[in-house]
Amino acid sequence: MQRFLASKEVSHPQVAIIGLPYDATATFRRGARFAPAAIRWASWSIESYSPVLNRDLENLCLQDFGDVELPDPPEEMIESVMQTMHALPEGCLPLLLGGEHTITLGAVRALARRYPRLAVLNLDAHLDMRDRYEGKSLSHATVMRRLAEELPGSLVQLGVRSGVPEEFEAARRLCLWSSPYLFLPPSIYEMLRERPIYLTVDIDVLDPAYAPGTGNPEPEGLSAHELLRFLRHLQSLHVVGMDVVEVSPPYDPSGMTAVLAAKIAREAILCFVPHLSC
Ligand SMILES: [Mn+2]
């Protein structure tokens, strides 16, 4: 049986899997650089078939492009991620395996050139909307602030339950929508349906009971079922890129967080690949 993150060469990949083993700006507990390997390994423990969606990865052309070697300075890392994105074959859906959340900025900058009306749907426990953190303007604690400034009115954040007052103020000013719940008002959902979407899943949006292996665990999170059910409800969105970030294998002794990340990746691929032709 083909495992969905197993490397193979295909002529016209529908999905490009790319590992971004980067955690140089992590503020609390590093380890996300080990996540791409852990998620690939964990993918062998789940089936390629989704009974809920009644779709199978075996019917898709996936290509794993391996890991990108990334420099430590975040500006250079982001440039490198952008170059990687630009080099992908036309028409395939990139699925990035972080790495810390800062990698998302490189992917979004690259895709925003191709899709000027790109909107970003971020599922995350943290706002990551500080202007600066420990004197730095670019880190996984500021990444969504930079993104929201570059794409005003284009960022939707769901599941957020942690941040300082400055961040909540910035979110009200710069985000299209920001909520602690997995809820999109109908008007926001209709707006998203009209735009190309980049979906980013920070594993810490889940409750630490389900995803303990992450750098900054935050209680009162979602269950695995709530998150997967929500993703399946978004099938009509035109997703043009996605990532799963902030899995930290050194804090994942059971390996369960990596397995859950692999399942999220599988379900997201099976949900969104048919919509690439939109
Ligand atoms: Mn987070």
Image (tube, rainbow, N blue to C red):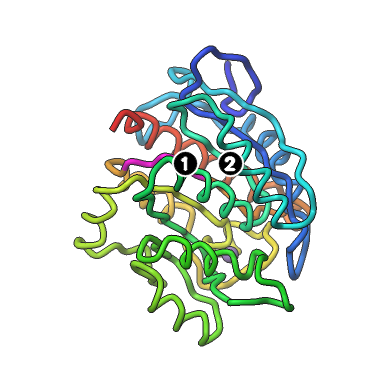
Q: Which residue occupies the foreground of this view, 132 or 159?
A: 132
In-image side of 90 versus 246 (left or right) = left
| Image disc number at residue 241 | 1
The residue at label 1 has a CB less than 8 Å from ligand 1: no
Tell me residue 54's x, y (percent). 35, 28
Asked which secondary structure carries label 1, the reply is: strand
At horizontal 29% and vertical 53% (from top left) the residue drawn is: 192
Image quadrant of ligand 1? bottom right
Tell me residue 264's x, y (percent). 50, 44
Q: Distance between the residues labelled 2 and 1?
A: 8 Å
Task: Name the chief secondary structure element in magenta.
Answer: strand
Residue type at mark 1 is: Gly
In-image side of 84 versus 226 (left or right) = right
Q: Which residue occupies the foreground of this view, 26 or 84?
A: 84
Total tally of numbered discs in the picture: 2
Residue type at mark 2 is: Leu
At horizontal 41% and vertical 62% (from top left) the residue drawn is: 155
Q: Quadrant of the N terminus?
A: top right
At horizontal 65% and vertical 45% (from top left) the residue drawn is: 258
In the displayed structure, would residue 195 be above or below residue 157?
above
